[in-house]
Image: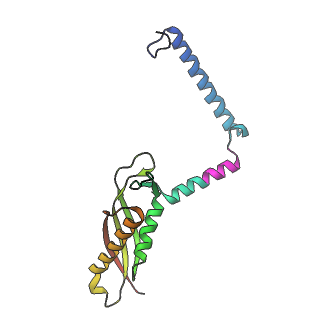
Amino acid sequence: MEGSSGSGGPHDAEATRHYLDQISALHRDWDELENRGDDSVQLSRRARSALAEAVRADARHGARVQMPPTEVGPYTVTELALRSLIRDTVDGVAGVVSLRTTVDHAPGQGWGTRGLPTRVTCRLSVAATVPRLPALPAVADEVRDAVRAACARELDLPDLVVDIHIEDLHEN
């Protein structure tokens, strides 16, 4: 049958060889021009600058994190946005300072995308005031409740597991 994707005759093999030779020649010519610094195969300064800025912004903001779909459809937030929400919430609890936050995710769909957050671990420092020290478990519960409430309210993640580790005490 004409045009089928099956095994062709000697003409198909010859055409394929010719095509591969042309591609190989194109690569050789391009590499030679690039090695000589020919402007026709170089990115402009403006394009390099824009590309570098895009890479820096992507690295700064982190991967995309899938969120529960809304009535409008699915959406993602950046890791930076998620961590900022958590950090601001932790820092909003009186006498508490966020030190580090880690987020575990379900498997993501696609390159550069993380799945739904499944667990958040907050490492923090608590003010070493005398009345508060015996109540460190209560402080941990207050921070956990605040993070869970913020994630439920802002991101529709009401069942997020939040682990709290008090790693340090600080003076006000």
Q: At 68% from the left edge and 41% from the top edge, which residue is drawn?
A: 42
- Apparent side of residue 85 relative to residue 60 in the rendered image (left or right): left
Residue sticking out furthest to the front: 71
Q: Position of residue 33 (x, y in %)?
A: 69, 34
Q: Position of residue 75 (x, y in %)?
A: 45, 53
Could you tell me how many numbered marks the image carries?
0
Magenta highlight on residue 45? yes
In the displayed structure, 119 sits above or below 16; it is below
In the displayed structure, 27 sits above or below 80; it is above
Q: Position of residue 57 (x, y in %)?
A: 56, 57
Specify the quadrant that holds the C terminus: bottom left
Q: At 37% from the left edge and 65% from the top edge, which residue is drawn?
A: 152
Which image quadrant is residue 119 in?
bottom left
Which image quadrant is residue 136 in?
bottom left
Of residues 65 and 133, the one nearer the viewer is 65
- Apparent side of residue 16 relative to residue 83 in the rendered image (left or right): right
Which image quadrant is residue 26 in?
top right
Magenta highlight on residue 158? no
Q: For the magenta stretch, what is the residue range?
A: 43-52
Residue sticking out furthest to the right: 39
Q: Position of residue 76 (x, y in %)?
A: 45, 55
- Apparent side of residue 120 relative to residue 48 in the rendered image (left or right): left
In the displayed structure, 153 sits above or below 169; it is above
User: Is most of the magenta stretch helix, strand or loop?
Assistant: helix
Q: At 65% from the left edge and 52% from the top edge, which residue is drawn?
A: 49
For the rendered model, the colour scheme is rainbow
In the displayed structure, 16 sits above or below 40; it is above
Q: At 41% from the left edge and 73% from the top edge, which residue is drawn?
A: 89
